[in-house]
Structures are given as C-alpha cells and as structure tokens.
Image (cartoon, rainbow, N blue to C red):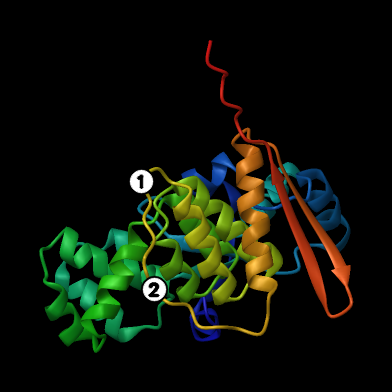
Amino acid sequence: MDQAQWAQTEIALLPTEQIALRPSVQQKSLSHMPLETLAASMAREGLREPILVRAAAQGYMIVEGNRRLMACRMLGWREIPARVQPKDVSDMTSVGEIFAALRARPMGYLDRAEATNRLTADFGVPRAAIAQQTGDSAAHVLSLQRIATLDDRTRDILRQERLPERVAEALTRVVDAESRQRIALRTAKERLDIREVELFVEAANRRLPGAKHSGKVVSAVRDARPYLNALREVVAQMNEAGLPVRFDEAQEDGGMTLTIRCRTRRRRSQP
C-alpha cells in the first residue's frame, strides 16, 4: 500500500470480534517475534500503529497487522485502532463498478492485479479492452493478471512485506509455490535487489525436472554478490534434497576462491 492510499484510508476504533484474519495468514505467521513478546510490548507502550483492514460482507477482513490483532485479543482488548480501506475488489459485482474503482482511487498493484483478473476471468472482458479503459498497456495487464494467479501465501508475503511489483513479476515465472515463497521471504529478509531475485528465480527453475536453459546471454556485471548468493541458494537446495554438498569460500588478495564438493555415485564393478 503506497503513501497516497494510506492517506486516503479512514481511522476508526473497531471491535476486535468484528475483524477476521485472512485464512492463509492464520496458517503461518510471517514474523519471528513470539506473540507473547509483542503482547507485552503493547501492554507497556500501547499500539504504535493502527492495523489495516478492509470492509467485508460481514465485519472486516485483516490486510496488515494480523499479529497485532492477535496480541490485542490476547490482552483482552475489545477495540483496536484500524485504518479502513474501501470495498474490496472481490466484493464488487459488475464490470462498471470495477472499472470505476480502477479509475477513481489509487490502488496497490496487488489489488489492481485482482481487479484486472476479475474483469477477464469473471466477466470475459478482453485484455485489450482493459488496457484501453485503464490506460495500461496490454503487456502490463497480462503481467498483472499473472500476479493475481500467484498462490495466497506468496501474495500475503508480497503485501505484508511491501515488496515491489517487479519482484512479484519475477515470482510469476517460478513454477513451484514453495520456491516462490522461499524467494519472497528471502527477498524481504535480505533486501535483495531485482537482479538477485532474478538469479534465484533461475536457480529455482533449473532444479525442476525437464528444465531447459533459456539461451539468453547475460551481460557482464562488476558486482559478484548476486552470483554468490545464487550459488549459496543452489547448494542449500541440494543439501535440502539429501545430497551432501560443501561450499567453501576463501578470501584472497584481490579475490576469492570458491570450492564446491559433492559426492558422486560410484559405479558398481562388473562381476
């Protein structure tokens, strides 16, 4: 959610019992801070930042701040300050309503992706017509619709960690959902740039059965860190798959020596 959207949301004191966690958020939390620690901090200092919700058919649905809401309930608080977004795209029931929302208010790319995808999937509106009505290019509309088809967990990470649209675009090229989620979390944790994300995407796809090289020529770069990170990711994936691999890095004057060791299967001797 960008600053323009944030400024246009209303702040209200909402009953905690009327706010529902998103189902995919309930399955696994993105934060490593124990909930009890967060609750203790809130008990001492109060809630520093309102949560973000959107109006639902019944009550409200959490967008950002699920752990703050859970900590609030743990403390027995009956109300919580919240910023309220306008009606969700998924609750809109007509082509005109969705187009009006796309034109009338600023949207984050995830909401825009859901809106453009609904226009085609639910109402049969061609991408060319969407592009004409919204001012987007047909290629951008297609990219947004691909983002809309990402799994719920990946979209939750993108939203809560506020990762940029280019990262989401790169993740649409990863076939395996678990790999997408791992790359998204690593991008947020290590603040990877798009170049590094692209390398992790390529590494994830190469380990899939039947994967083929793209044949693209990659231009030379002066910074070796993206390639080192990609190597570390491949080694980690091999170890996770049960193939013991050792990766040694030795600093030397003016450079590094990288050594990768793995066992090869010995051929059985002929009788």
Residue identifier under label 1: 210
**Which residue type does callout 1 highlight?**
Gly
Horizontal side of 243 relative to 178 (left or right) equals: right
Picture quadrant of residue 169: bottom left
Horizontal side of 202 relative to 39 (left or right) equals: left
SS for callout 1: loop
N-term-proximal mark, 2 vs 1:
1
Horizontal side of 125 relative to 28 (left or right) equals: left
Decide which of 79, 102 is in the foreground and name it. 102
* Mark 1 residue crowding within 10 angstroms, few (<14) / some (14–19) / many (20+): few
Which residue corresponds to the image point at 11% horizontal and 69% vertical from the top-left? 125
Cα separation between marks 2 and 1:
18 Å
Which residue corresponds to the image point at 25% horizontal and 70% vertical from the top-left? 116
Residue identifier under label 2: 216
Q: Position of residue 217 (x, y in %)?
A: 43, 77
> Quick check: can you spot residue 79?
no
Decide which of 6, 246 is in the foreground and name it. 246
Picture quadrant of residue 160: bottom right
Decide which of 179, 6 is in the foreground and name it. 179
* Mark 2 residue crowding within 10 angstroms, few (<14) / some (14–19) / many (20+): few
**Which residue type does callout 2 highlight?**
Lys
> Quick check: can you spot residue 209?
yes
Decide which of 202, 146 is in the foreground and name it. 202
Exactly how many numbered labels are in the figure? 2
Reply above or below: 114 against 220: above
Q: Position of residue 6 (x, y in %)?
A: 54, 79
Direction bottom: furthest residue: 135
Any mark on residue 54, and which? none
Reply above or below: 61 against 27: below
